[in-house]
Image (cartoon, rainbow, N blue to C red):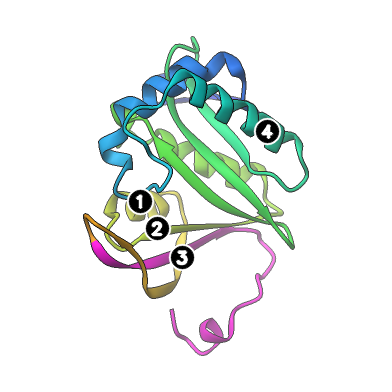
Amino acid sequence: MEFALTVNGLALCVRAPDPALVAPVREALNASYREHAPFLEWAIEHTSEERALSSMLQARDDFASETGERRLFIVTEDGQAVVGCIGLVPRRRKRYVVGYWANSAFAGKGYLREVLQQLVRRLPEFTFYLTTSSANTRSQRLAEAAGFALIRVHPQARQSQQHGVQDTWVYRSGSKRQTKKSPRESAGEP
């Protein structure tokens, strides 16, 4: 699943978990904490080198497993900066649930959108799902810009100190074959 691409003039590599990426991942997470904290439960104010290494080793093990999350790190061609990460959590019937985070220094420039679109194109037999908070407009814009369609809203499904009670929005993309609809979708409900 590794590949290279150029987005808006920046050469990028999409890579599997690698301990060589620990330092730039740690830098990206620490620099982006304020943006991550309201929406990512795992975000902490200061990611230590030990924690970053432990997480990377676990990600490498998960990537190699049949049922583990496949974290794909978006890295500048020189390997000095991590632009972000897209995680694909496998589900039954050729489905992935997508999670991601962006390095704030690279956010809003189309890098995650392009990588997400590439993944959907490179894995045409899969259906991809992405969830976001109703308060996270940046995630909503990313999902829609990457070609995902809003298929469902789970009212009052989350809560945070900063945003209070929020809905969870569910998006879907991919797979040319018809995905089985839920009873609510079949009835025309979101």
How far apart are labels 2 and 4 at the CA level? 25 Å
Q: Which numbered dot is residue 132?
A: 2
- Residue 168 position in % (x across, y down): 39, 66
Amino acid of disc 2: Thr
Q: Is residue 9 visible?
A: no
- Residue 124 position in % (x across, y down): 67, 51
Q: Which residue is mark 3?
A: 170
**90 or 58: which is nearer to us?**
58
SS class, disc 4: loop
Q: Earlier in the sequence, mark 2 or mark 4?
A: 4
Q: Earlier in the sequence, mark 2 or mark 3?
A: 2
How far apart are labels 2 and 3 at the CA level? 7 Å
Q: Which residue is mark 4?
A: 1
Q: Is residue 121 above or below residue 22?
A: below
Q: Is residue 137 above or below residue 1?
A: below
Label 1 environment density (alpha carbons within 10 Å; few <14, some 14–19, many ≥20): some
Residues tagged 2 and 1 counted as in contact (Cβ below 8 A): yes
SS class, disc 3: strand
